[in-house]
Amino acid sequence: MRFLSIVTCLWAAGVYGAALGPILERESSSSDVTEIQAQIAANTDGFWMNDLSGKGIAAFNANPGAYKVFRNVRDYGAVGDGVTDDSEAFNRAISDGNRCGPWVCQSSTDTPAVVYVPSGTYLIGQKIVFYYMTQLIGNPRNLPVLKAAPSLRAIALIDGSPYSNVGPDYPAGWTSTNIFLRQIRNFVIDGTAVDPSVGFQGIHWPASQATTIQNVKIRMAVSPISTHAGIFIENGSGGHMADIETEGGLYGLNIGNQQFTLRNIKVSKAKIGISQIWSWGFTYSGLSISDCGVAFSMINGHDQEKLQVGSVVIIDSEITNCPIFMDTAWSRDTKPTGAGQLVLENIKLVNVPIAVTGYGQTKLPGGTMTIEAWGQGNKYSPDGPEKFQGPMDTADRPQSLLDGGKYYSKSKPMYENLSVGDFISARDSGAKGNGRDDDTSAVQNAINLSASQNKVLYFEHGVYKVTNTIYVPPGARMVGETFPAIMASGGTWGNKDDPKPVIQIGKAGDSGSIEWSDMLVQTQGATPGAIVIEYNLNTQRGSGLWDVHTRIGGSKGTELQVAQCPTGSVNERCMAAHTNVHVTKSGQGAYFENNWFWTADHDLDDWNSTQISVFTGRGLHVEANNVFLWGSGVEHHALYQYQFSNIQNVFAGYIQTETPYYMPTPDARTQPYGRSDRYNDPNYTTACPAGKICDPYGLRIVDSKNVMIYGGGLYSFFINQSTLCSDSTIPNGLRDCQNRIFSVEGDSTVQWFSLNQVGALEMVTIDGVDKAKWSDNLSVYSNTIGWFKYKI
Ligand SMILES: *[C@@H]1O[C@H](CO)[C@@H](O)[C@H](O)[C@H]1NC(C)=O
Ligand SMILES: *[C@@H]1O[C@H](CO)[C@@H](O)[C@H](O)[C@H]1NC(C)=O
Ligand SMILES: *[C@@H]1O[C@H](CO)[C@@H](O)[C@H](O)[C@H]1NC(C)=O
Ligand SMILES: *[C@@H]1O[C@H](CO)[C@@H](O)[C@H](O)[C@H]1NC(C)=O
Ligand SMILES: *[C@@H]1O[C@H](CO)[C@@H](O)[C@H](O)[C@H]1NC(C)=O
Ligand SMILES: *[C@@H]1O[C@H](CO)[C@@H](O)[C@H](O)[C@H]1NC(C)=O
Ligand SMILES: CC(=O)N[C@H]1CO[C@H](CO)[C@@H](O)[C@@H]1O
C-alpha cells in the first residue's frame, strides 16, 4: 500500500523539539563476523530462538555468507545491568551489515534482522532507531526492561521512523505507508525516570501492513502534569497490536493511521487512556481501561470544524473508574458528514458516570452497567442514509464464534516454555533455503517429521524454493525466523485452468490443529496455476496462522520485479497466481490473525520503489463456515480481493483492500485469468453497468449468512497507475477511480460496522442495485458508513 494520508500531528507536549536526531546517521558496520559467531554460542539463555540461532541466511544478500540475520544485543556490547548506557549497543546490533536505514533506503528484502534481547535491565540514554524488516524480540520467559535514562530526549525510546532535522520538510526516515514486515515483542519499557514534564514516548510507530507490536508493557510516571505517551503513531496504513499494557502518562496510546486492529490492550492511570489522532477506521477488541480521566478521546479537529477521526469500533471491553468513557464530537451536521462515527458493543462499565459525551453533553449516561450496543453515525439497513445516535439492535453473535460471550481470539504462540529439543531445524533437515536449490523434499520431510514427533519446525531465515505442493498435515507447528519464504517455482503451477496449491494445509477430510507464524509464501516467475495457500483443515480451536503473509512479486529472487514486470502491458511471465488464499468448504474453523495477502504493486528492492504489474486472479476466497479474520489485508487481485461464498458465520475485522493499480487496463472483464464457475467467480460481463469503469470488487458476499464485519476499508486509488482520480485536493471530495466495490448477492445476511471506502462511486451494491453513494458519507478523505445491515 503506497497511498499517503492526510493528517494533523498531535505530539505529546514538548517532544517535537527534542525529537530530531542528526540526519543520515548510519552506524558503522561491525566487521568481524567470526568473532561474533563465536560469541553467539556463548550466549545461550534457555530461550529456544536464541539458542538455535546462527543458521539464518539472507539468500539474496550480496554476501549471504557474512550477513548476520540473528543478532544478540549482548554480542554488540549491551550489558543489561541497569547502569551502563546500552543504547549504542542496540543501535549497532540493529544497523550492522549495511542494512536499510532511514533516508537512504525505502525498503529492502535482502537485509532482514532479528535483534534479540536477553533478560536484563538495559539503560537507554539515546533513542533506539528501528530499521526496515527488523524484529526486535525480548526473551518472553522473563521480559527484558528497556529503562529510559532520566536524560533521554527523543521522540521515543524506540523510534520506528526518525524525523530529519534538515528543513524545510524534515522528512521521516521512511514513507509511513511503505513500512512493512516489522515486529516488536516481549518487552517492558520503563519511562518512569524521565521527568513527567519532559516528553517521553515508549514507541514511535508509523506502520503499515505486516507489522505488529505484541506483549509489550510500558510504564510511565503517574502525574497530573505528565506529557508522556506509551505508543505514538501519526501516519501509515497498518496494522496490528496485541497484548499491550501501559501505565501512567498523559496518553496510554496516542495514535492515528488509516486503519488498525488492536486486541487485548490494557491502559491504566493515564489522563487520556487512548487518544485517537485520526482514522478512517480502527477496530479495538478487549480494551481494558482503568483509573483514567477520559478513557477514550476521538474529538481531534472538531474545534476547526474538521474532525479528523472517521470511525471507531470497540467491542468486548471493560472500562473501570474513569469519569468519562468516550469523548466524541458527532452531530447530525458534523463536518465532514461521515466523520466521528462510533460503534460500541458489549462494553462493561464499572464506576464510569458518563459513558459517552459529545460537545460537553452526556449522550449516554454510564454507571456500573454493560453497554450491549450503542452507536452514532450513518446507517444503511440496507437503505439509507439515516443518521442515528443511540442503542442499536445489532445481530445476535453466532455461538460458534464465541468464547465466554466474547469473540474468540488467541495470540501468536511464542513457545516460551519449550526447549531446543522440542524443535526441528529446517536447515539441519537438509533444506538449503538459498533461493536456488530445490528444497521440496527436504521441506516436506521436515514437516512430516516434526508433526509425527510432536515438535515445532523452525524455518531459519532463507528462501526455500519448492517445485511441488507442500502438504501440511494436522498437528504441524511451524515458525519462521523473521519471515523466511517458501517460494514456488516451475511447471507444476503452469496452467491457470488447472490450479494446484503451493502450501496445502490439510486435505479435505483432515481434522485437527495447526500453528504457523512469522513466514512468507511467494512465487517465482510465471505460476498462473498457483493457489498460494489452500486451507482444507477442519480446524480444532487453538489453531491459527499468525503473521503469515503472502508476497507475490516485488522482491529479489521472484523474477517478478521491475526488469521483468514493468507497468503498461499484460505480460504472461508476470501471471503469478490463480488464487492467493483459498479456504475451501472443508476448512471450517480456520483462524487467521494479522495476515497480508499481497500482490506487489511496486518493487521493494528497487531504489525508487518503481511500480510493477504483477497479475494474480483471486484474493482470499472463503468457502468454509466459522472462520476468523483478525486484522487482514488483501490487495491487487484481478477478480476480487475478498470473496465469501456459501458460508455461515465469519468474524472479520479490520479488513482492508486495494484494487490493482493497472485497472481498468485491463479491466475485471478482460483480465487474463478469465472466470470459472468452479470457483464461483463474479461475472463482470453482467455485473458491471455499461459505460462505467469495471474494476474488481474489494469484497463480494454470495449466499452467506452471519457475515460479521467489525471494521473494513475497500480502497481504490488508481486508474492506469495514476492517483489523479483520488487526489486529496479534488473539490468536494469526488474521488472517481472505480464504480462498484462491494457486492452482496443471493441469500445473505450481513452486518458491517465501520464500512470505509475510497475511490468508488457506489459504496454498496445488493443484487445489482446500488444502495449507497459516496457523496452521502464523505468522511476523513475516505467515505464511511458506521452501520450497514442486510436481512438482520
Ligand atoms: C503524514 O503523511 C503525510 C502525507 O505523506 C505527510 O504530509 C505528513 O507530513 C505526515 N505526517 C507526519 C507527522 O509525518
Ligand atoms: C509457560 O509457563 C509459565 C510458568 O509455568 C506459565 O505461566 C505460562 O502460562 C506458560 N506459557 C504457556 C504458553 O503455556
Ligand atoms: C508426509 O506425510 C503425509 C501424511 O501425513 C504423507 O501422505 C506423505 O507421503 C509424507 N511425505 C513424505 C515425503 O514423507
Ligand atoms: C531513480 O529515479 C531517478 C529518476 O527517474 C533516476 O534518475 C535514478 O537513476 C533512479 N535511481 C536508481 C538507483 O534507479
Ligand atoms: C456471464 O454472463 C453472461 C450473461 O448471462 C453470459 O452470457 C456469459 O457467458 C457469462 N460469462 C462467463 C465467462 O461465464
Ligand atoms: C487507461 O489507459 C488506456 C490504455 O492506454 C486508455 O485507453 C484509457 O483511456 C485510460 N483510462 C483512463 C481513465 O485514463
Ligand atoms: C444524508 C446526508 O447526510 N447527506 C449529506 C452528505 O454530505 C453532504 C456534503 O457534506 C451533505 O450536503 C448532505 O446533506
Image (cartoon, rainbow, N blue to C red):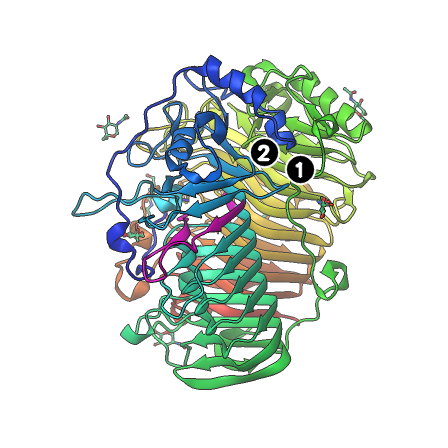
Is residue 593 left or right of 668 when viewed as pictured?
A: right
Give, as a single range, the part of the protein colored magenta: 187-212
Along the line of sight, the residue nearer the viewer: 211 or 424:
424
Residue 143 image position (x, y, % from top left): 57, 44
Residue 711 image position (x, y, % from top left): 54, 61
Residue 51 vertical placement versus 669 (above, below): above
Pointer 1: what residue?
516
Pointer 2: what residue?
519
Magenta run includes residue 211: yes
Is residue 505 left or right of 172 when viewed as pictured?
A: right
Kind of element beneath mark 1 = strand
For the stretch drawn in magenta, the main secondary structure is loop
Q: Residue furthest left?
A: 168
Residue 331 image position (x, y, % from top left): 41, 81
The disc at residue 331 is: none
The crowd level at tag 2 (other Cα within 10 Å; few <14, some 14-19, many 20+) is: many
